[in-house]
Image (cartoon, grey):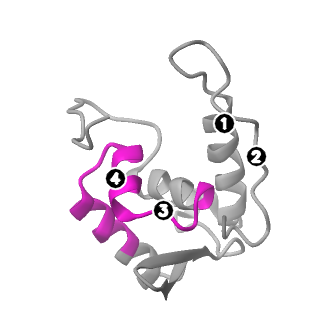
Amino acid sequence: MDGAPEHHSGWTFITNHARVLAAIADNSHARIRDIAAHCRLTERAVQRIIADLERDGYLSHRREGRTNTYRIEPGKILRHPAEAGLPVASLLSLLVQDEADRDDRNGRPARPARQVSRECGG
């Protein structure tokens, strides 16, 4: 992938905020550029999403040299009333698991299934 987001029309089941959070749960040391490429978003969009998630307490970061290490708050409750009582960890356990089950272009499993820890830090 060249890092440029692919254009798509219509709607999707998963929000960009959920995609970014799942990418961070998968790699807490990921660079914004890598998150953007993985989620097929612009770097600026990822920066805005990370700022939203930090502002609302779902995510925090710590600067380590030239990189950030992100920490997800797994017990934080999802915002929408329809998901009342569901913690972020429940959402991430579905998203990270589903992504792990995808096959690469050669039909091989992309990687082993991964459990999202209570820490959700990577």
**C-beta proximity under 8 Å, tags 4 and 3:** no
Q: Is residue 47 above or below residue 105?
A: below
**C-beta proximity under 8 Å, tags 1 and 3:** no
Q: Position of residue 71 (x, y in %)?
A: 60, 76
**C-beta proximity under 8 Å, tags 1 and 2:** yes
Q: Quadrant for residue 3, please give it.
A: top left
Q: Which residues are magenta?
A: 25-50
Distance of label 1 from label 2 (alpha carbons): 7 Å
Element at label 4: helix
Residue that carries the numbered disc 4 in the rendered image: 36
Residue 76 appears in the picture as rendered: yes
Residue type, numbered disc 4:
Ala
Residue that carries the numbered disc 1 in the rendered image: 100
Residue that carries the numbered disc 2 in the rendered image: 114
Membership of 47 in magenta stretch: yes
| First in residue order: circle 3 vs circle 2 | 3
Q: Residues within 10 Å of mark 2 (few under 14, many from 20)?
A: some
